[in-house]
Amino acid sequence: MSAYFVTATGTDIGKTFVTAGLIRAARLGGLKTQALKPIVSGIDDANPAGSDPAVLLDALGETVTPETLARISPWRFAAPMSPDMAAAREERFIPYNELLETCRDAVHAARDGMLFIEGVGGVMVPLDARRTVLDWMADMRLPLILVAGSYLGTISHTLTAMEVVARARLKISALVINESEGATIPLEETLATLRRFAGVPIATIPRGGDMSAFAKLASLL
Ligand SMILES: Nc1ncnc2c1ncn2[C@@H]1O[C@H](COP(=O)(O)OP(=O)(O)O)[C@@H](O)[C@H]1O
Ligand SMILES: [Mg+2]
């Protein structure tokens, strides 16, 4: 099985960017590749260009249509807020069991290929009144790709996120240090420090994310 759950230490860290790169690397390697971004907030269905599902569909070589959008991101909310809040604004909620079922169906369908499921926000963003992304990941039990930044402060955020997923007995297949915009700390120094503490395979993605960096990351999976 080659299905992975892509999570991050926070929002806007680079989950979609990294997932799109991994999709391209897998497709270049001739692998059948699928992706899901089940929950997306801050999306305008009438103008989805640049949204997470649009970026992932582009990497998959698919066009954005109402159908492909609904397939890759079944739960879409307009407000750019955490999913529980964004859903409440529309007097909706995320049907958790249906979310799990959709993800499990995708894992089953992708058993002869690659599947990347992008979470939402960081590892403990609320999905509803009592569940967070951590519950979702724990119920899926997929190996994780944890995306972290390279900004000042990332080491503590990353080790904190790792501690939380370890407590849920989840496996991190790859920790990705994705170079943050305007980062003042060399990627290599953050890598060296995290190597001492993290104890999982680590890859780095520089700004712009060249294909060789994504290929190296894909080789860890
Ligand atoms: N390594 C990178 N190089 C250039 N731009 C990046 C890189 N990583 C992320 N970005 C950009 O930063 C923004 C936030 O990244 P994104 O992948 O959408 O984060 P997330 O999915 O975790 O919220 C996007 O506009 C994305 O294109
Ligand atoms: Mg995203």
Image (cartoon, grey):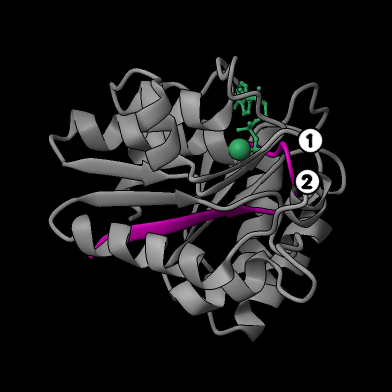
The answer to whether residue 94 is left or right of residue 174 is: right
Disc 1 Cβ-to-ligand 1 distance below 8 Å = no
Residue range in magenta is 1-14
Task: Answer with mark 1 or mark 2, whichever residue precedes in sequence.
Answer: 1
Residue drawn at 36 percent across, 40 percent down: 216
Quadrant, the N terminus: bottom left
Mark 1 and mark 2: span between their CA atoms? 7 Å
Residue extending farthest front: 91
Front one among 68 and 5: 68
In this rendering, the answer to whether 23 lies above or below 62 is below
Image disc number at residue 128: none
Badge 2 crowding class, 10 Å Cα cut-off, few under 14, some 14 to 19, many 20 or more, is: many
One can see residue 213 in this view: no
Residue 71, by quadrant, is: top left
Whether pointer 1 and pointer 2 mark residues with C-beta atoms closer than 8 Å, the reply is yes
Front one among 30 and 42: 42
Residue 24 picture location, percent across and down:
32, 29
Magenta-drawn stretch contains 158 = no
Q: Where does label 2 land, which residue? A: 86
Quadrant, the C terminus: bottom left
Residue drawn at 80 percent across, 52 percent down: 88
Residue extending farthest right: 153
Image depth: mark 1 or mark 2 in front: 2
Q: Where does label 1 land, which residue? A: 80
